[in-house]
Amino acid sequence: MKASVKQWITLGFVLLMLVKAWVIPLVYLDYELRKEYIIANLCINRDNPIVVCEGKCYLAEKVVEAKKQEERRAEQSYMANLLFQVMDTGKPFIFQSPEYFETNLAVTFSYISPFLPRSVASEIFHPPLG
C-alpha cells in the first residue's frame, strides 16, 4: 500500500515538472487545438477583415506572457534561494571558549651525534686501521 502511494506522489511530481518545462509548447498546442475559436473570438484583428493573422497575434501575446511569467518565477526562486542561504535557519553559531587549557607545553629536543654509528653497515664499513 505504501509503495503505491509513493509511486503516485512521484508520478505527480514528475507531471508537475513536465508541465513547468513544457509551458510554451502547451501554449502552441492550445492554439492549434482551439484555432477556430481563437480566430472568431479572441483575435485582436477579428474586426478588421483586411488583416489576416488567423489568431497569431493572440498566440504571440500568450507566448510573450508565458516567457515573462517563467522569467519571474526563475527570478523569484533565485531570490528565495539566495535569501535562504543568507538567512540560514539552522542552529546559530556560538563562540565558546575551551573548558581547559593544556599546560603541558614543555618542548623536548633530541640530538643524535652524526659520529655515532646508527646502523650495522657503519660497523662493517670503516676506514682501515693504520
Image (cartoon, rainbow, N blue to C red):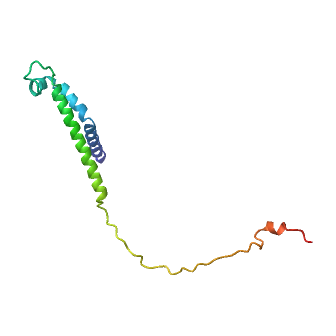
Q: In this view, does 109 lie to the left or right of 43?
A: right
Q: Which residue lies furthest to the right in this view?
A: 130
Q: In this view, does 80 lie to the left or right of 106?
A: left
Tell me how many marks there are: 0
Q: Which of 101 and 64 is in front in this view?
A: 64
Q: Is residue 12 above or below residue 98?
A: above
Q: Residue at (29%, 53%) from the top-left corner?
A: 82
Which quarter of the rendered picture does the C terminus lie within? bottom right
Q: Is residue 5 above or below residue 102?
A: above
Q: Residue at (22%, 28%) from the top-left corner?
A: 29
Residue 20's image quarter?
Answer: top left
Q: Which residue lies furthest to the top in this view?
A: 50
Q: Which of 57 and 94 is in front in this view?
A: 57
Q: Residue furthest left?
A: 47
Residue 114, percent from left and from top: 75, 72
Q: In this view, does 109 lie above or below 47?
A: below
Q: Residue at (46%, 79%) from the top-left corner?
A: 101
Residue 87, percent from left and from top: 28, 59
Residue 84, percent from left and from top: 28, 56
Residue 75, percent from left and from top: 26, 46
Q: Is residue 30 left or right of residue 111?
A: left
Residue 9's image quarter?
Answer: top left
Q: In this view, does 114 lie above or below 18?
A: below
Q: Is residue 68 left or right of residue 118?
A: left
Residue 64's image quarter?
Answer: top left
